[in-house]
Amino acid sequence: MTISKKLSKLQLISGTKVCEIFDALYPDILDIEYSSESEFMAALWSRYTPESSVLNGSVFEGLLAIIFYRSGIIPLYVQAKLSFVPNVDFDFVAYSKEFGPIVLSAKTSLRERYKQADLEGMMLRQVHRKSKSYLITLNEIEAKTVNQKIKEGLVLGLDDIVVATDQKFDALIAELKELSYYAPNKIDVLVSSRLIK
């Protein structure tokens, strides 16, 4: 069985082009030993030659999904919608007993796109007050700039910007590994003791 078939079966990647890339570049991805997640990401990303921004994002998301999976951060929801947070598809959501939803957004570069993740994080916190929201990127300079804005109170919906090839990513993964994850129950939109018709 090819690696893309294994990864697709595990729901870690999807899409024909992404599967072709993983078969060509990462046939050993589930077996590679690594000492840190950031070094693992750096080694894997260096094998890839960036193409279109959409494909770059899909490959980056696939690599992150595999790291989360191998780190035991599961169940993990991909391109997830949360109840009462309208019109938002979160890249990754892990639901923890400690905080409720933990959102992990993936952007290979930030430019102005961090503003979208910030707005989504603010919408999330209107419903899930204890939730956490992290933006994971590959661009160190942009991450430093936006983290300064978080410190200054100019970005409210994000807890942190983390570079996937930095030791801060290892710290985030270690922190996430300590939490207890579960699949949340489906909720009724309306509950009542009586219904008048």
Image: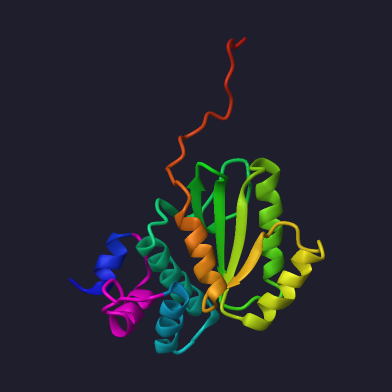
Q: Position of residue 2 (x, y in %)?
A: 21, 74
Residue 136 spot, x, y in % from top left: 57, 69
Q: Is residue 78 visible?
A: no
5, above or below 185, in the image: below
Q: Is residue 3 visible?
A: yes
Quarter where residue 76 is shown = bottom left
Side of 17 relative to 31 (left or right):
right
Q: Is residue 34 magenta?
A: yes
Determine the residue positioned at 42% across, 42% down.
183
Residue at position x 67%, y 71% in the image: 113
Q: Residue at x 63, y 47 (%)?
A: 86
Q: Position of residue 40 (x, y in %)?
A: 41, 78
Quarter placement of the C terminus: top right
Of residues 143 and 8, the one nearer the viewer is 143
47 over 192 or under it: above or below: below
Q: Nearer the viewer, residue 32 or 2?
A: 32
Tell whether 185 sits left or right of 103.
left
Instruction: Find out whether residue 142 is within the magenta segment.
Output: no
Q: Quadrant of residue 88?
A: bottom right
Pick the residue in front: 17 or 160: 160
Q: Residue 18 occupies which quadrant of the picture?
A: bottom left
Is residue 140 shown left or right of residue 187? right
Q: How is the image coloured?
A: rainbow
Residue range (magenta): 11-35
- Identify the main secondary structure in magenta: loop
